[in-house]
Image (spheres, rainbow, N blue to C red):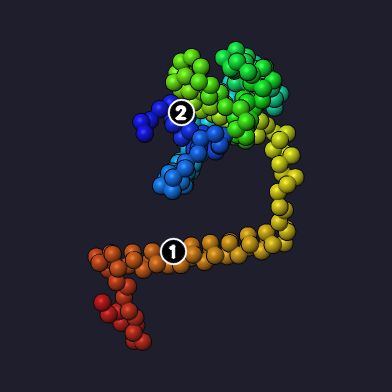
Amino acid sequence: KPISSSTSLTAVILVYSIGYGHTVPLSDGGKAFCIIYSVIGIPFTLLFLTAVVQRIIIYVTRRPVLYFHIRWGFSKQIVAIIHAVILGFVTVSCFFFIPAVIFSVLEDDWNFLESFYFCFISLSTIGLGDYVPGEGYNQKFRELYKIGITCYLLLGLIAMLVVLETFCELHELKKFRKMFYVKKDKEEDQVHIVEHDQLSFSSISDQAASMKEDQKVNEPFVTPQPLVNCDGCINN
């Protein structure tokens, strides 16, 4: 079967773990290929998204917060909170409200709520599949429409991950996350520290002794120390 925009959209939906379920493999070979493709594609997609988000967040979050903190002298925590709220508002506007208006216009039987519902279900990777755009036979420019949806899903997921990472770096959320960390016993920690220090000191002393022995072996032109006999004579 020739590759169409619907097939490429299905591949993107599969590796992004959205899973609408409107297009599924029917043959045994197709199901086996789907398993292999998912096992390989999903980890690489997660690595790709992580790498992209880590690079974007430097220019979108960290540098602007640091700039306002150093340039204008504002508190870093306050700047980070305001920046996170503004970034979240811009992301919701650009990837939820505006696309919902566009979908409600392009899809004949969708209203604004249904379009917004589709955007939320898609970008949250829930993917129920009850609303899938571009499935109507009378859809104009269907191939281009599917490609646009694919780009929207890719950019929307990256934007969502950037916003989540920005909120996770807030100082208040870091304190909240510490409440769920498993606390270790202090006595056990001290025992581990002492054992680690003892191992470190012993390894350092052993290494110093071996270095001295190697130095003696590697210096053949050093005059050996004279041996003194019981009569006080010096024997070279």
- In the image, taking residue 195 as reference, residue 50 lies left or right, namely left
Q: Position of residue 71 (x, y in %)?
A: 61, 17
Q: Position of residue 165 (x, y in %)?
A: 61, 32
Instruction: Please give the name of the residue rendered at 27% of the width and 68% of the height, measured from the top-left corner.
Output: 223
Label 2 neighbourhood size at 10 Å, few (<14), some (14-19), many (20+)? some
**Nearest to the observer: residue 58 or residue 67:** 58
Secondary-structure class at tag 1: helix
In the drawing, what numbered circle is on residue 194?
A: none
Q: Furthest-front residue in view?
A: 137
Which quarter of the figure has residue 84? Answer: top right
Which quarter of the figure has residue 226? Answer: bottom left
Instruction: Please give the name of the residue rendered at 70% of the width and 48% of the height, measured from the top-left corner.
Output: 181
- In 3D space, how far apart are the residues under numbered discs 2 and 1 (Cα atoms)? 68 Å
Establish if 69 lies above or below 2: above
Q: Position of residue 203 (x, y in %)?
A: 49, 64
Kindly check if marks 2 and 1 are in contact, taking CB atoms under 8 A apart as contact. no
Q: Quadrant of the N terminus?
A: top left
Q: Amino acid at mark 1?
A: Ala
Instruction: Please give the name of the residue rendered at 61% of the width and 27% of the height, measured from the top-left corner.
Output: 131
Instruction: Please give the name of the residue rendered at 51% of the width and 28% of the height, measured from the top-left corner.
Output: 154
Q: Amino acid at mark 2?
A: Ser
Q: Quadrant of the C terminus?
A: bottom left
Provide the residue designation for mark 1: 208
- Residue 98 makes an appearance in the image: no
In the drawing, what numbered circle is on residue 6?
A: 2
- Residue 23 makes an appearance in the image: yes
Q: Furthest-top residue in view?
A: 105
